[in-house]
Image: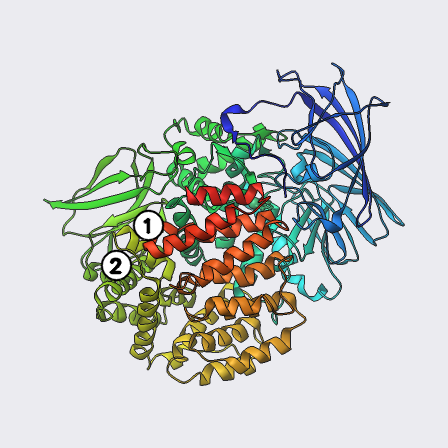
Amino acid sequence: MKDAAPQTIHLKDYTPFGYRIDSVELTFKLHPTATRVISKIAFAPNPAASDTRFFLHGEELELISAAIDGAPVIPRKVEGGIEADVPDAPFVWEAEVEISPETNTALEGLYMSNGMYSTQCEAEGFRKITFYPDRPDVMAVFTVRIEGDQPVLLSNGNPVERGDGVAVWHDPWPKPSYLFALVAGELINHPDSFTTKSGKEVELNIWVRPGDEDKCAFGMEALKKSMKWDEDTYGREYDLDIFNIVAVDDFNMGAMENKGLNIFNSSCVLASQATSTDANFERIEGIIAHEYFHNWTGNRITCRDWFQLCLKEGLTVYRDQMFSGDMRSHAVKRIEEVMILRARQFREDNGPLAHPVRPESFVEINNFYTATVYEKGAEIIGMLRRLIGDEAYRKGCDLYFDRHDGEAVTIEDWLASFEEVTGRDLAQFKQWYSQAGTPRLKMSETWEDGALTLNFTQTTPPTPGQKEKNPQVIPIAVGLIGPNGDEVVPTTVLEMTEAEQSFTFEGLGARPVASVLRDFSAPVILEREIDDATRAFLLAHDTDPFQTWEMGRMLAKDTLIAMIVRDAAPAPAYLDAIRAVVTDETQDPAFRALVFGLPSQDDLAQTLFDAGITPDPQKIYDARESLRHTVARHLSDALPTLFRPTEPGTFTPDAEGSGRRSLSLAALSYLALLDGGAAATSLFAQADNMTEQAGALQALLSAGLGTSELQAFEAQWKDDRLVMDKWFTMQVASAAPDKAAEVAEALSHHPAFTNKNPNRFRAVFGALSANHAGFHHASGAAYKLLADQLISLDSLNPQITARMSGAFETWKRYDADRQGMIRTELERILATPNLSRDTTEMVSRILS
Ligand code: 0A1
Ligand code: ZN
């Protein structure tokens, strides 16, 4: 918990630090409750700065001694750190502090997890390790000496000394403190090596706790593929002699890109056929790539201040998305990306937590590691590339890397590289970084004398602190399909810059059907009058996979909305359309599985709300369940053929195998509604991989079955914490609306539950907030339970508490009773004595 009074920090107030750092030497004498950190830092006045105040951040540190140029000093304690009087010339600062890793439950700074020491310094954790200018624009070369009796002692950079109870590491690349890392413990490595394109041999290691060594091979392959891809695609080579990855059980986020020493939440690196699902494998491959790619986009070139977070995150997400597309299927990946963007970022952009990709102020930066910064940030890079073309994009990136290597920069610096290589003015485009909210793009069509005109208007709704919005630059990728199903105009990118704009395609023989926003070319909501017949036509003939999926999705949504609002029967147009796609053996099974899936309850709630209808969570749940049963019956003849379990002994975690299994398991979940769970029960007993074992259990649970399988699963996996997370999640996720809170509450008393492990807490309470009808059950039981849990978690781990309070961000969609109950819970959280800055900021923003 942070004790500083909440203070708002503004982008406009940025000033450089008054001193540069020539070198940092740190010595760690490890002890669970009394680690000593000795620092020796060579400072020099920064001629580019006007503010010469010598302020060092520091939190929860016990100062033992301090000296300047060898003379002892007593620094002044000020809010958030210390101040001292220093010479107007280069000087050496030395300090010794004591910290207590074992009692650090916030998992920021140096902490202990299952007996091992680990660090997490992004964003502002280094100030819990020693006094330092803990800001990203202060970059320095670090040498780190670790003294401890653990067999493995790791830090950033290259090893210079390895001895009994001591290790010294030197990182030659200047870095900000948020990239500092240290790990010490009894660890086992999975070693390998990689030869870079210029012939340099790099030692690679994945370090894990004993017992996990058989779960490293997949991650290691992903790392080598990432290293090769960054060379081939961006010309970026690795720059140290060694690259270490460590798996840690207690970790707030997915992973962290510390220079040369990436630290991973064990759920994001450990993988095996028996314990990981296909989705786990895919995610692990993407996260390993993401962290590795940060070596250039984030580490060699970093952010001037935390407002520029999207500079490294949006770009690195974009890079990992392209990598995953190259490794797997671009079409399928793009659909998955859009699903995530809509579920998380559009949701955020439509509520009280909406903020620009580059926020202008914050209280706690940890609260801004959001879908907007990451996912919308990545969409901006995709739009930029679409507008300027692949070649100019690569040239602009090269210029950016050349020009800013070793610097801490801004979005302006990033865009300037592209302005220079293209000669374009990107001033209007830059608004994507400053304007919050999801633009609504309305389209109408006119057809006259062989010319099709597409008329667009764009508006962006008001968001907190931003009432008026300007028109954005929107790349709209369009193709035209002739009446016979042939493409008459291939994909063309229309560049919309005005509030209203029309684009005409001339010389057309017969009126074509427009396929608009292909590949989801901009993060907007397209509003278009389109009938079911045209949707079905595009679903059958469009050459753009995203569009075909989108048409299926719109048909599904419309039928569900009609079922919810008018008690209508499921639309035959939808049922026939999905039958055609899912039974089409010529199409990719992964794509067919995506078409098979129904829109989420949360998505339907937002759609109803946007249409001016107050969503009733129970009705949404009932309609979706009823459609699931109808689809099952409608496809009853096809389901047994679509359900194709993997032959024992043939499992591979690649796109092909995973696509086949996702279609097969989608079919199984419908089949379970018809066959009393027979097929799922036998798959559960026979599966030799977690994808099918968990998929079978999930199918049983969502058909209201599976009690004995749930017990068998627990007995089999009780010693595997990552698999047990799945066991916790599945029960809460599949609980009926009136049972969800009860199930979550009971699980919170299970001996294996702990709120000190973020994965376990999320497994239960993340699942509760994602069970839409359960979370919003009219009793309000889930609201109260989550609030109780957040109140007790806050003093242990503010970061996770603040994040999870986002479960309430959609509260204004619902009826007065639910709003009243949620308000009561939010106010109760806010009234908690000593509530953290993190949670105070989040809950206040949600309430505002
Ligand atoms: N930079 C890491 C993720 C990360 C972000 C924030 C953290 O603490 C507030 C920790 C890690 C990434 O993008 O992978
Ligand atoms: Zn990142």
Q: Nearer the viewer, residue 705 or 644?
A: 705
Determine which residue is flagged by label 2. Answer: 538
Would residue 606 appear left or right of 409 to someone viewing this image?
A: left
Q: Nearer the viewer, residue 814 or 322?
A: 814
Determine which residue is flagged by label 1. Answer: 518
Image quarter of the C terminus: top left
Q: Nearer the viewer, residue 767 or 91?
A: 767
N-terminal label among 1 and 2: 1
54 to 267, vertically: above or below = above
* Location of residue 547 in the rendering, given as x and y in whole percent from the top left corner: 32, 55
Would residue 32 appear left or right of 622 to someone viewing this image?
A: right
Outermost residue toward the top in this view: 88
- Amino acid type of the residue tagged 2 in the rendering: Leu
Residue 643 image-quadrant placement: bottom left
Outermost residue toward the right in this view: 164
- Amino acid type of the residue tagged 1 in the rendering: Arg
Asked if residue 635 shows in the view, the reply is yes
Label 1 secondary element: helix
111 to 731, vertically: above or below = above
Which residue: 31% across, 66% down?
619
Tell whether circle 1 marks a residue whose Cβ is less than 8 angstroms from ligand 2.
no
* Location of residue 616 in the rendering, given as x and y in whole percent from the top left corner: 31, 61
Which residue: 45% across, 56% down?
333
* Location of residue 67 in the rendering, given as x and y in whole percent from the top left corner: 82, 25
- Could you tell me how many numbered marks the image carries? 2
* Mark 2 residue crowding within 10 angstroms, few (<14) / some (14–19) / many (20+): many
Residue 265 disc label:
none
* Mark 1 residue crowding within 10 angstroms, few (<14) / some (14–19) / many (20+): many
Label 2 secondary element: helix
Cα–Cα gap, marks 1 and 2: 12 Å
Image quarter of the N terminus: top right
